[in-house]
Image (cartoon, rainbow, N blue to C red):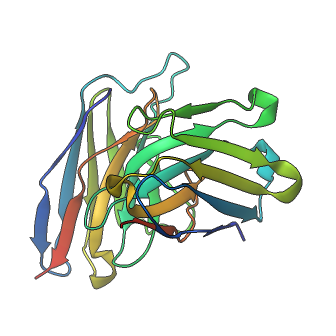
Amino acid sequence: DIVMTQTPLSLSVTPGQPASISCKSSQSLLHSDGKTFFYWYLQKPGQPPQLLIYEVSNRFSGVSDRFRGSGSGTDFTLKISRVEAEDVGVYYCMQTIQLPITFGQGTRLEIK
Amino acid sequence: EVQLVESGGGLVKPGGSLRVSCVGSGFTFNDAWLSWVRQAPGKGLEWIGRIKAKTDGGTADYAAPVKGRLTISRDDSKNTLYLQMLSLKTEDTAVYYCTTGHQWGQGTLVTVSS
């Protein structure tokens, strides 16, 4: 199974400040077709997960441009340019290049 | 608007069985590959299985911890995805979500307890 490792597991950010979350996979997520099957989700308190970023760097419909995904191969990063109160929750990375689909442990973001 | 609505969760005794459903709308259901993901209380997300669109074979794949006890099926005429769970264990207690990957339902809670 591909292991997804997120760091940090929690972070506390002052509103208006940036935040960054890392996710490393145990195998490359680059497919032979050129796509990288890597995703970021946010699960707000009491809600289901919502897709933020697909295929490394593509923002899903309606997602703020404060969110930016980057990376390649096995190393990926989610950056929030200016954290807002509505960004609170748990962020998960996910890979779908190989079954079983696997998630990172989650990174809890709180507001200072 | 894309919607996924799960139902059928509840309290079941260890060893019992349960079927949960997920109705999709706002997208071409029969073209979608659909997954079930569960979340135990206070824990992270765990993928448990996926079914392909019938045009791609319609086959289902499962995570090792549930293989042989869970069956995923679909009825495209009803825009409905199913998860049949057998021989339930206390560790199967979780919120069960259906998802296209892009969209998620609100989830249905399955509690396995005597």
Q: Is residue A50 visible?
A: no
**Number of callouts:** 0
Q: Residue visible at 24% across and 43% down?
A: A23
| Residue drawn at x 46%, y 28% as measured from the top left | A97
- Does residue B38 appear left or right of residue B10 in this picture? left
Q: Position of residue B50 (x, y in %)?
A: 58, 40
Outermost top residue: A32
Give A36 or B66, whichever is nearer the viewer. B66
Image location of residue A34, percent across then percent down: 51, 22
| Residue A103 falls in image quadrant | top left
- Classify the position of the N terminus of chain B by image quarter: bottom right
- Residue B111: tell me if it is visible: yes
Up/down of B72 relative to A65, above or below = above
Viewer-proximal residue among A17 and A2: A2
Q: Residue furthest right?
A: B77
- Which of the two residues, B43 or A77, is positioned nearer the viewer here? B43
x then y, percent, for residue B14: 40, 57
Question: Residue visible at 19% across and 57% down?
Answer: A20
- In the picture, measured across the screen, residue B59 lies left or right of residue A33, that is right
- Which quadrant of the rendered structure holds the C terminus of chain B? bottom left
**A50 versus A75 height, above or below:** below
For the point 81% across and 49% down, the residue is B75
Q: Is residue A87 above or below residue A63?
A: below
Image position, residue B10 (x, y; %): 51, 72
